[in-house]
Image (tube, rainbow, N blue to C red):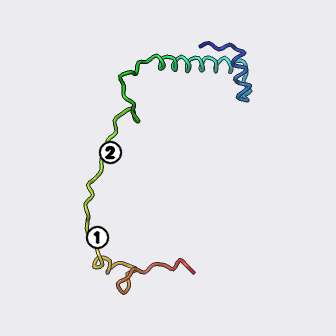
Amino acid sequence: MDFSFEDMQKLARLSRLALSEAELNDRKKDLEQILSHITSLQNLSVENIEPMTHAVPIELFQRSDVAMTGIGRQGLCGSAGFEEGLIKVPKIIE
């Protein structure tokens, strides 16, 4: 699709951009390249391709859900802040 210089001026005005004549010509070339690429994508045949969420197949590797034992009360007894069988924490509510 070809754009005229007037089309580019109108597009710049609607976009509220102040572009010089050289910048308008550069953007015109860029826009024509983008639209050319879009046209080539529209011409691709995708009839035998199933819809997909990702271009590359993604497999999620999940570890098995296995219950593990913790260190328990005996492991906590020697730690700092452990007092009379309870964990002592700083006071946060007045």
* Quarter residue 4 falls in: top right
Residue shown at the point (30%, 50%) measured from the top left: 62
- Secondary structure state at the residue bearing disc 2: loop
Near-viewer residue (42 or 37):
42
Quarter of the figure that contains the C terminus: bottom right
Residue 44 vs residue 73, the one in the foreground: 44
The answer to whether the residues at label 2 and label 1 have Cβ atoms under 8 Å apart is: no
Image quadrant of residue 54?
A: top left
Q: Is residue 48 depicted above or below 76 in this figure?
A: above
Percent position of residue 81, x then y: 40, 80
Q: Quadrant of the N terminus?
A: top right
The picture places residue 52, in percent across and down from the top left corner, at 39, 33
Residue depicted at 72% across the width and 20% down the height: 9
Q: Position of residue 78 (x, y in %)?
A: 32, 80
The quarter holding residue 80 reads: bottom left
Q: Is residue 1 left or right of residue 16?
A: left
Up-down: is 56 above or below 85?
Answer: above
Q: Residue 17, labelled with which disc? A: none
Amino acid under disc 2: Leu
Using the numbered discs, state the Cα–Cα distance from disc 2 to disc 1 in whole angstroms: 27 Å
Counting other residues with Cα less than 10 Å from the Cα at mark 1, is it few (<14), some (14-19), or many (20 or more)?
A: few
Which amino acid type corresponds to the residue marked 1 in the rendered image?
Gly
Q: Looking at the picture, does residue 87 appear above or below residue 37?
A: below
Few, some or many C-alpha atoms within 10 Å of disc 2 (few <14, some 14-19, many ≥20)? few
Residue in the picture at 59% in, 20% down: 30
Q: Which residue is mark 2?
A: 60
Location of mark 1 (residue): 70
